[in-house]
Image: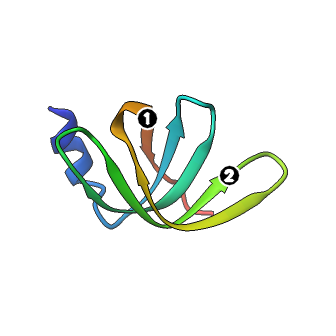
Amino acid sequence: MRPHDYLKEFLEDIVLVELKNGKLLRGRMVSYDGHLNLILDDCSEISEDKEVRLGKVFIRGDSITMISPATPD
């Protein structure tokens, strides 16, 4: 299975995205492209002590280390 086929399953679902800089984002994946760039809506940056709401964000594919479906809270 190619990465693009895998991502198609998570369109409109809540995902966790880990970035190369160690940040963890959670949001609803609304789009992706051939470079694995993502657009997340209702996105938040998650850390141990707080959650910062970011809204709609664009994430460059080359900054992503992991994409995973989010477990329900």
Point out which mark residue 38 bears. none
Given contact means CB atoms under 8 Å apart, are the residues at marks 1 and 2 in contact? no
Mark 2: few/some/many CA within 10 Å (<14, 14-19, 20+): some
Where disc 2 sits, the SS reads: strand
Mark 1: few/some/many CA within 10 Å (<14, 14-19, 20+): some
Residue displayed at 43% across by 35% down: 64
Q: Please indicate whether residue 61 sits to the left or right of residue 63 in the image.
A: left
Residue type indicated by callout 1 = Ile
Q: Please indicate whether residue 69 sits to the left or right of residue 2 in the image.
A: right
Q: Please indicate whether residue 52 sits to the left or right of residue 44 in the image.
A: right
Q: From mark 1 to mark 2, how far is it between C-alphas?
A: 15 Å
Image height check: is 52 above or below 8? below
Where disc 1 sits, the SS reads: strand
Mark 1 or mark 2, which has the lower sequence index?
Answer: 2
Point out which mark residue 64 bears. 1
Point out which mark residue 46 bears. 2
Residue type indicated by callout 2 = Ile
Where in the figure is residue 49, as x and y percent of width and height?
85, 51
Q: Nearer the viewer, residue 27 or 21?
A: 21
Residue displayed at 56% across by 50% down: 25
Q: Quadrant of residue 68?
A: top left
Where in the figure is residue 48, as x and y percent of width and height?
80, 45
Q: How many marks?
A: 2
Where in the figure is residue 45, as x and y percent of width and height?
64, 54
